[in-house]
Amino acid sequence: MAQAQRPSSANIRDFESATVVSELIQIAEYITHMRDEIAALRANEMTRDRIPMAHEELGSVLAATAGATNRIMAAAESILSLPDGAEHRPVLEEHIGTIFEACAFQDITGQRISKVVDALQSFEQRLDRFIGAVRARDAAISDPVERARRERASELMLNGPQAEEIATTQDDIDALFA
Amino acid sequence: MALDLSMPILVVDDYQTMVRIIRNLLKQLGFEEVDDASDGTAALARMKGRKYGLVISDWNMEPMTGYELLRHVRADESLRTTPFIMVTAESKTENVIAAKKAGVNNYIVKPFNAATLKSKIEAVCGS
């Protein structure tokens, strides 16, 4: 009786084999799922097309704003150095015209920034989906350069400009120095 | 308030457009002796060679920030009394408080206008 209830070694091997096969199938399904999610991320497209495009557009925005600022400031400095007298009005109007022309940069840079914002939104959606699929957790920063950069920024309070609604106002600062 | 318009002023900013803006504003206020430096290290070198009546400095610069410059100036026996105004986009309260503790005389957040700059210079340097 006792011998009949004891599983034979052949039965144990069959059970273990079935378990291993089942686990291997699950792993294979998970790998297939991951491959689909990685493909949906379209990482090659991001690094080959979208990110270089964003770099290029933002570089153009920087150049355009710097160029426009220099033209506006040069015109303003020329106006400031004009002598008094109505006879200088044509020169004054020419400089004012230059300022108006230079302000046209805002239209072009606005369109360039919109393209970058669209690309960022696309990245965000793809990464959100990927993070959800792989249940990703953030590891500690392992890059020593990045870690040093963050430590320096924290130590020296390099916070950068704040959103208008949370930034300390000049009036609040003045109160601290009153 | 009477301002000494002949006093030399050192403008410290790594963004040349901002240096140009502050130079023009100072010129409009009547200041003619304006030097500039692109970071704290360059500013300290200039301050060793000339006595300035006022330093107007940005915060976020490389390699030496304006905050580090302020601490160096206040720790240096020959420079510690130099009036120092921070002009920066760093608008967190912790930045303002840290600068005040380090000995800054006044603090202006960017963007700012000529009237603000004038009132702070008067508050710091007016006699």
Image: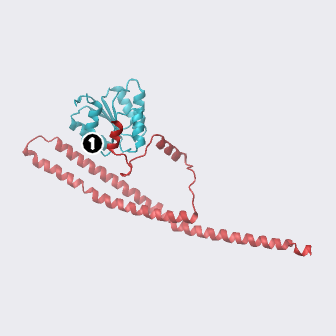
Whether residue A22 can be seen here: yes
Please tell me the colour of chain B.
cyan
Q: Does B30 appear above or below A34?
A: above
Q: Does A130 appear above or below B83?
A: below
In the rendered image, residue A8, in percent from the top left (x then y), is placed at 86, 73
A50 relative position to A173: left or right? right
In the rendered image, residue B122, in percent from the top left (x then y), is placed at 26, 33
Q: Mark 1 belongs to which amino acid?
A: Ile
Q: How crowded is mark 1: few (under 14 residues within 10 Å), some or many (20 or more)?
A: few
SS for tag 1?
helix
Whether residue B69 can be seen here: no
Report the chain holding disc 1: B
B76 relative position to A78: left or right? right
Name the quadrant of the N terminus of chain A. bottom right
Q: Does A11 appear above or below A71?
A: below
B9 relative position to A93: left or right? right
The image shows a total of numbered marks equal to 1
In the rendered image, residue A90, in percent from the top left (x then y), is placed at 10, 49
In the rendered image, residue B94, in percent from the top left (x then y), is placed at 43, 42
Q: Furthest residue to the top? A: B78
What is the letter of the red chain?
A
Q: Tell me which residue sits at (62%, 68%) in the image.
A: A31
Name the quadrant of the C terminus of chain A. top left
Q: Quadrant of residue B46?
A: top left
